[in-house]
Image: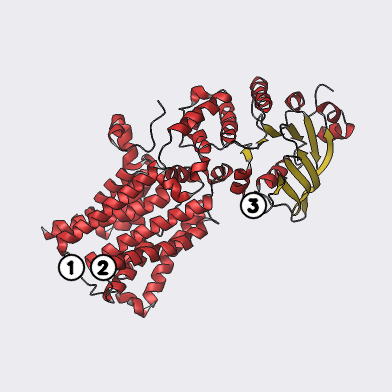
Amino acid sequence: MGYEISLLTIMGISIIGSLSLNLITGFCGQVSLGHVAFVGIGAYTASLLTKAGTPFFAALVAGMLLAGVFGIIVGLASLRVRHDFLAITTMGVNFVFLGVVRQQEWLGGELGVSSIPDPGFGKLGFLVVVFGGVVLVVLLSVQIRRSWMGYAFEAIAGDEDTARMLGLDVSRYKLIAFALGTALAGLAGGLYAHHVRFIYPDSFAFVESITLLAMVVVGGNGSIWGVMLASALLSVLPQWFQFIDDYKLLLYGSLLFVVMRFSPGGLAGLLQQCFPKAQNYLPQRREDEPT
Amino acid sequence: MSLLDIRGVSVHFGGVHALEEVSLNLNDGELLGLIGPNGAGKTTMLRVITGVVRASRGTVQLEGKLLNALPTHLRVRKGLGFAQQLVRPFQEMTLVENVAFAVGSEHTRHPWRSLLRVERKAALREGREWLAKVGIDGAADSLPTAVPLGFLKRLEVARALAIRPRMLLLDEPLAGLNQAEATAFADILVELNHQGQTILLIEHNLAEVRRICSRLVVLDNGRKLDEGSPEVVLTNPAVQEAYIGQGTVYADN
């Protein structure tokens, strides 16, 4: 039973992490290839704080805040660069993060942070906390999608110059997308650190950013339910099959290629193609036409 | 007082003088044509007005308020509406959703408030009305990839109108249309102008420009060459000379 609970906990944390990236890349169209760096910021911040005696939830919030602040700084770069240049910039963020944590003794260096305190909820209690987080992130994603903020994100993803010509403050919206997305990544990081109770730099290596991106792309860029489904699958497969974990970069990289080539809409797009009526049973992206 | 007042605007790209001391004004309710051969500086002038390009010298004022330091989106909020030469619809949105986003531009001024606002029906309803005004409401639910260029040109105008601008800037809206389509589209612009919409039209189709504009400003090599009624301006030998060699000669003369 303990194994299943652990598996579900990892699944829930992955869903929070991938939905946080979906907010930036899927909703707002800003490619981010180094998203796991913000998961790492949340993980290191929360675990160091709980080790110093800070209550678990306060440490979690602090991790989110710090990840969000760094997200805004990276978001500022997105105001200057776009598309493939932004992808390279964000990829660099991941390597900078790794470079810093590896060299800093107070962050544990190569050995990382161990003996992270148990939050004290028990395994099942922690699973409930994680799924509480999942529910909050899903509700926030749905609200963004159906609101005018989601409409603005969609416009920016479509053509930010045109959005600007219609009076939209594109810069502010992009920064908000980065702030929200990276803060939620920080939440995933804080939960992850207190689940495994030991983190080290390789927990946040580039391959983990690719894994998060694969979850978003395979699920369907911008689709909340598709990304959740892909996250659930891709997070448990390496736990079930050791070879998937061993060849993660190769397999997930190939998966990205195959999905982009044959089904750019991901699982959500595939579902829509195969079962056009199925979308009637899923939350709509926008309100229906006027009656 | 002019609605739009441009004084002594110069734009230099390195050693290239794209605009040199150009002044022009647009009166309330006017349909002004800005013409000139390729490379005359028309699009640069438009970019100066929208804030995409900053003037090296000179001022741009809308209703007496200086726009020079404002970014594009704030100029739009002050009353500029802009339809681009190369159509750029939001490809993932239907035509009516494209326009509805512009209709509800007020709702996106404050990001956090926009998160709490969900209702879109009124904006979609008004979006259909704007599409009807430019004659493409029949394709309201189509994606931009499924409609011809003429529809997308009209969509650009409908979207710009939907933010209720004090003045509308149109960059070659007739380009790429056949003569029948161009004439029909030009008639729509006249109708909008008669309804009180102030329009600054940049256009190469001189026959339509002459037919619909009340006044013309001619640019050539970054300088203002002439200004006045279409009949007078288009018979000016200097203007005709500017066009000869560009392969575009006004046929009626």
What is the number of the mark on residue B33? Answer: none
Which quadrant of the view contains residue A103?
bottom left
- Asked if labels 2 and 1 touch by Cβ distance under 8 angstroms, the answer is yes
What is the number of the mark on residue B70? Answer: 3
Q: Residues within 10 Å of mark 3 (few under 14, many from 20)?
A: some
Q: Which residue is mark 2?
A: A56
Q: Residues within 10 Å of mark 1 (few under 14, many from 20)?
A: few
Q: Are marks 1 and 2 on the same chain?
A: yes
Q: Amino acid at mark 3?
A: Leu
Task: Tell me how far mark 1 sits from mark 3, CA to CA.
Answer: 54 Å
Task: Tell me how far mark 1 sits from mark 2, CA to CA.
Answer: 9 Å
Q: Amino acid at mark 1?
A: Gly
Residue pictured at 22% horizontal, 53% vertical: A237
Element type at mark 2: helix
| Relative horizontal placement of residue A163, taking residue A286 as reference (left or right) | right
Residue pictured at 19% horizontal, 61% vertical: A126
Q: Which residue is mark 1?
A: A120
